[in-house]
Amino acid sequence: MQPVGAAVPLRVDIADKTFMSAEGVSITALRDLSFEVRQGEFACLLGPSGCGKSTTLRILLGLDKEFTGSFQLPQGAQNRVAAVFQEPILLPWRTVEQNVRLALPKDRRAADLDWLFDSLGLSGMRSLFPAELSLGLARRAALARAFATEPAVLFLDEPFVSLDERTAERLRHLLMDVWSARPTTALMVTHNLREALMLSDRIVVLSARPAHALGVFDVRLPRQYRSPQVMDDLLRSFRQRFPDVH
């Protein structure tokens, strides 16, 4: 079904998502998956590899309509939806700035984006082409393109996967700087628990396939207070609540 606006900003009720493998075997990816993300909240969808996290995002993005159930997306910002994937997916013949501005409606393509490029450390990269960027910089450009649209909801599918930890950590902080400046309802897929604890207001914990929600872990502490020691405390609390999640 098509997403519609609702009082609850983001609501997911997927009864079943089944597909056929290349070998002709029926595989159920999702079953009775239900959760909500509140207005202006940054949530993470945490679960083991292959459990159906990315499948859930594809459904919410309207890229997969073969499922049973329903979902509702938030309204506002002309109901714009933005997504950041594992690969940056930048047009190689366009500069960084052109890639970012092409995502905007024609009447907004001349908008002042200096704050966004500055926040993501891209001010000196605006005229470069994707082939001239490291993977980390290309991921920054993909984040800039998503935030430039000022979406009502932002989906991120493991945007820091395959990066070295130092680069990934830097990008997590940049993501939070930009998101905190202009918060929007966001849902990020990850299988990295520490990443989820660092970024999230709440973590929706998924089971192995067929995925359903095992529960929700709320992280109420402001992000500026999540020091390494506090992160260790949060990790222990999470392990106590979900001892079987690895």
Image (cartoon, grey):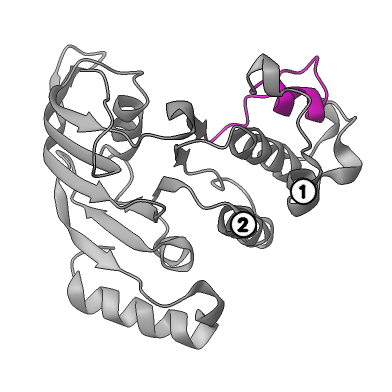
Q: Residue at x 18, y 50 (%)?
A: 207
Q: Residue at x 42, y 58 (%)?
A: 192
Quadrant location of the N terminus? top left
Q: Is residue 17 left or right of residue 199?
A: left
Q: Is residue 151 magenta?
A: no
Quadrant location of the C terminus? bottom left
What label sits on residue 115 in the rendered view?
Answer: 1
Which span of residues is magenta-colored? Answer: 85-103
Within 10 angstroms of label 1, few (less than 14), some, or many (20 or more) residues?
Answer: few
Q: Is residue 114 above or below residue 80?
A: below
* Tag 1 secondary structure: helix
* Tag 2 secondary structure: helix
Q: Is residue 7 left or right of residue 159?
A: left
Residue type at tag 1: Trp
Q: Is residue 225 left or right of residue 211?
A: right
What label sits on residue 188 in the rendered view?
Answer: none
Q: Is residue 60 above or below residue 51?
A: above
The percent position of residue 237, horizontal first and vertical second, equals: 28, 80
What label sits on residue 181 in the rendered view?
Answer: 2
Residue sitting nearer the eye, 135 or 215: 215
The percent position of residue 219, horizontal first and vertical second, equals: 35, 71
Q: Are marks 1 and 2 in contact (CB under 8 Å)?
A: yes
- Mark before the other along the chain sequence, 1 or 2: 1
Q: Is residue 192 above or below residue 45?
A: below
Residue type at tag 2: Ala
